[in-house]
Image (tube, helix red, strand yellow):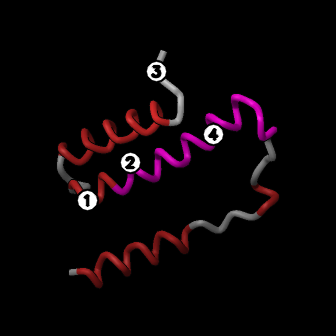
Amino acid sequence: MHKIWLIALAALAGCNSSSASDWKEIQTNSKESRFERAKAICNGRAAETQVIAGRLWMAGAIAADSTFKACMAEQGFSPK
């Protein structure tokens, strides 16, 4: 079972073929840069939570959403 997860993760890692020219640089002290950084970190945590909780279960989606919101709050952002 663990081999299947490793193969799936390896396949997903290979899907990211972006280059430096596909990305824009943002000011490091701007609100936008702090938000984008927080969003990237929190999306990663939410994805990990969803995998652990079960991708096909509603509980996985709910857990991932809760993790994302909690992470964004830790990073200093809250929904309007």
Residue occupied by mark 4: 36
Q: Residue at x 59, y 66 (%)?
A: 16
Q: Residue at x 62, y 34 (%)?
A: 35
Q: Main secondary structure of the magenta part?
A: helix
Rounded to the nearest whole Å, what is the CA distance between mark 3 and mark 1? 25 Å
> Does the magenta run of residues contain 42?
yes
Residue occupied by mark 1: 52
| The N terminus sits in image quarter | bottom left
Give the magenta part as a residue range: 27-48
Does 50 sit left or right of 46 as displayed?
left
Does 38 sit left or right of 61 as displayed?
right
The image position of residue 3, as x and y in percent, is 29, 84
What amino acid is found at the position of numbered circle 4 in the picture?
A: Glu
Q: Please, is residue 47 above or below residue 71 in the view?
A: below
Residue occupied by mark 3: 79
Rounded to the nearest whole Å, what is the CA distance between mark 4 and mark 2? 15 Å
Marks 3 and 4 in Cβ contact (< 8 Å): no
What amino acid is found at the position of numbered circle 1 in the picture?
A: Ile
Rounded to the nearest whole Å, what is the CA distance between mark 1 and mark 4? 24 Å
Sequence-earlier tag: 4 or 2: 4
Sequence-earlier tag: 3 or 4: 4
Does 20 sit left or right of 44 as displayed?
right
Residue 59 sits in quarter: top left
What amino acid is found at the position of numbered circle 3 in the picture?
A: Pro
Rounded to the nearest whole Å, what is the CA distance between mark 1 and mark 2? 10 Å
What amino acid is found at the position of numbered circle 2 in the picture?
A: Ala
Sequence-earlier tag: 3 or 2: 2
Rounded to the nearest whole Å, what is the CA distance between mark 3 and mark 2? 16 Å
How packed is label 2: few (under 14 Cα within 10 Å), some, or many (20 or more)? many
Q: Secondary structure at mark 1?
A: helix
